[in-house]
Amino acid sequence: MSRLPAFICGIDWSEGLNDVAVISRDGAVVTRARIEESPQGVTDLFRLLDGLRNSHTHGRRHVPIGIETADGLLAATLRARRQPVIHIPPHRIAAMRKSLSPVPRKSDRTDAEIIALAVRDGWGRLRPQPVDSPQATAIGVLIAAHDRTQRTRLRLQAQLRSLLRQGHPHAVTAWTHLDHGLARPEARAVLAAAPNAATAAKLTQYRLTKILAAAGRRRLVDAEAYRLRDLFTLPVLRLDPAVETAMAAQISAVLGLFDAACHTEQHLRQQIAAQLALHPQAAIYLSFPGCGTLLAARLLGEIGDDPTRFATAKGLRGYAGLSPVTWASGSSKVILHRRVCNRRLKTACHQWAFSALTRSPGCRAVYDTRRAHGDTFPGALRHVAGRLLAGLHHCLATGELYDERAAFGGIAPP
C-alpha cells in the first residue's frame, strides 16, 4: 500500500463555482478556494496545489483529488493532465456528513472538506480513475449514444406496433418472418406510403415494386411486391373512416420518429466501426471468437486501454461480475453470485460468451462441462465469459492475438 500523501484535495462540483478544500494527513484544513470550470480555474487549482510545499520533490501530481462527479469537463481535464482523480460517490459523502455532525446540514464548503476526508480515510482501498486514451474515450461515448438510441428505437417500435394493431393490422405481421421486422428500411418505406389499412389496400404491385426498390431491396422485388399486395387486400376489421384517418396521422407521426431513430442508430454504428478501426487494440478484440465490431467496441469502451487499471485477470473478472463472492460468518460459508459490478460490461460479456459457443470448440467444451456439473444456463455462460475475459487480459498485456490452442488446448475445462 502506498504511503498516505502529505496533502489531499477535495472538490465539491457545481455548475457555477467549485469549492476546493485541501487537508493535511491529520485532517486539518490547509487552505480553501473556489474555482471556475474553465481553463483559468484549472490553472488556479494547479497553482494552488504546486504552492502547498516549497520543495523540488513536491508537485501537484503528489496531491490526489477527490471529486463527487466522475463525468464532466473538470474531471476529464484533470485526468487528461495526469492529475490523480478519485471518485467519491454522493451517497458516501452523505453518510460521512451524517456521521460527522448530529445536526442535518449541508454546504458546498464543508462538502469539499468531507470529500478530502473520505479520500484520506479510504486511502489504500481507493484507486484513481483510469486515464484512457482519447480514442478509447471516444469509442465509449459513441457506444453510450448507440445504447440510448437503441433503447429509443425499441420503445418507438413497440409504440408503432401497438398503433398498427388498431389502424393497420396486416402490417403487424407483414415482416415478422424477416430480420429486424418493422425496423427494415422497406417496411418503413411501405408504411410511410400507406399508414393505414385503407391506403394499403389501394397499393398496386407496380407501386409496391417502386417503393421496395427505392428502399434498397435488390432480390425478389416483384415477388415481395405481389406478397404484400395480396396481404393488404385481405379482409380485415376496419375503424370508422374519420377515426381511421386520424389513426393514420398518428401512425405517420410515430413512424417519423421511429425512422429517425433507425437512421441515427445506423449512423452511430458506422461511426463506431470507424473509430474502432483507428484503435491499436482493435485487432486483438476482433480476433476473439464471437466478438464482432459492435461488441468489441462495447468491451473496449467499458474496459478502456489504461494498462495499469487491471493488474490481474481476476480483477477484470471481478469488475465484470464474473467472479463469485464468498460470504463467511461463523461456521457458515456461502459462495454467491457477484452483483456489484459494471453491469454494461457484464451484459456484453454474456452476449460474447453466447456468441462464442458456436465459434469456439473450447468455449463449447467449457459450457458443456459446466452444464453436466449442474450449472444453470447463466452460470455456465459466466464460466465461459470468465475464460474469454482472462484470455483477453493476457492478449492485451502481451499484444498477442487470440489463439484457440493456447486458450484451451491441453487445459481441462473447469
Image (cartoon, rainbow, N blue to C red):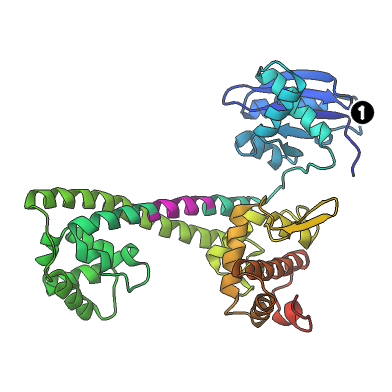
Q: Does the magenta portion include 387?
A: no
Percent x, y of residue 207: 14, 69
- In the image, 164 versus 286, the foreground residue is 164
Q: Which of 94 and 103 is in front in this view?
A: 103
Crowd rating for badge 1 (residues with CA inside 10 Å; few <14, some 14–19, many 20+): few
Residue bearing the label numbered 1: 55
Tell me the quadrant of the picture where the N terminus can be found.
top right
Q: Is 281 on the left or on the right of 234, as rendered?
A: right
Q: Which of 81 and 90 is in front in this view?
A: 90
Q: Can residue 277 be seen in this view?
A: no
Q: Is mark 1 on a helix, strand or loop?
A: loop
Residue 259 position in % (x across, y down): 31, 55
Magenta residues span: 144-154
> Which residue is found at the position 70% from the left and 76% from the top?
373
Q: Residue 225, image x and y in percent?
A: 19, 75
- Residue drawn at x 73%, y 56% is 318
Helix, strand or loop for the magenta stretch, by majority: helix
What residue appears at the point 65 percent right and 79 percent down from the top-left corner? 368
**Residue type at mark 1?**
Ser
Does 294 sit above or below residue 111? below
The quadrant holding residue 258 is: bottom left
* Residue at image point 24% right, 68% down: 214
